[in-house]
Image: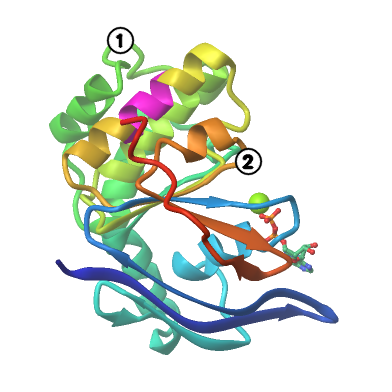
Amino acid sequence: MATVVQIENLRKEFGKVCALDGVSFEIQEGEWIAIMGPSGSGKTTLINILGGLDTPTSGRTIVDGVDVGRLDEAGLTRFRAEKIGFVFQQFHLVSYLTALENVMLAQYFHSTTDEREAQQALERVGLGDRLEHLPTQLSGGEQQRVAVARALINHPKLILADEPTGNLDEANEKIVLDLLRELHTEGRTILMVTHAPSIGSLADRRIDFSHGHLVPQLAPVGSQRR
Ligand code: ADP
Ligand code: MG
């Protein structure tokens, strides 16, 4: 099985704060990983570095064979567009673009736009009747489903989801988690940050963080719920 993510001795300092303190792990193709840990333990910092949104102080990050630390700005832009699908807690949709246009914008950054494909992606997340809606005209759950469609549109090698259900009610949480489960079944590789043990247990494997360190795993968790 192919290794999609390889992290070696990753360290990130923000002034005196050490957000990541020598983190190493690997993720294999098709794995669904839950990153867990208290607030401030370095989870978002890790996701940002993996996705090429931030740079580490030291250490190495390899995603799908690409050494992310060696990319220049243009290379990082391409890397993000081609390899990564982001789903953030705060959705981060462009407020003056419709649902359809938000998805097409991701296509545009990748290569060319294809309205039919963007429409199909929105249909897939159950929003076929919301194509022309602006983010403000959508509920939180619907906005997050647009973000999931946007994350998938370029067939990324890795889906990075940082507390994807953190701002959702229970019904929408279930819809988004069902989508992630479906993607996992299709063989996608997913790295998901969550606070909730019940959500973490959906994943194949849990990686626990504490103060920028990995907490050693005592017993395998997960898979029994799937
Ligand atoms: P988590 O996502 O687990 O809640 P973060 O990765 O956001 O944690 O933050 C880890 C630590 O790094 C925290 O102590 C936070 O205050 C600090 N930190 C994160 N981003 C910055 C930044 N841009 N500047 C300064 N400190 C930061
Ligand atoms: Mg965070």
Tell me the kind of residue under disc 2.
His
Mark 1: few/some/many CA within 10 Å (<14, 14-19, 20+): few
The residue under the point 28% across, 51% down is: 108
Is 30 or 206 nearer to us in this picture? Answer: 206
The quarter of the picture where the C terminus appears is top left
Work out whether 35 lies above or below 215: above
- Pick out the residue farthest to the right: 16
Marks 1/2: CA distance? 32 Å
Q: Quadrant of residue 67?
A: bottom left
The residue under the point 25% across, 41% down is: 184
Tell me the kind of residue under disc 1.
Asp
Left or right? Give the position of 1 relative to 151: left
The residue under the point 30% across, 33% down is: 181
Work out whether 40 lies above or below 58: above
Kindly indicate whether the residue at mark 2 contacts the one at mark 1 (C-beta within 8 angstroms): no
The residue at which mark 1 appears reads as: 129
Is 182 or 53 nearer to us in this picture? Answer: 182
* Range drawn in magenta: 175-180
The residue at which mark 2 appears reads as: 195
Where residue 74 sits: x, y (%)? 38, 77
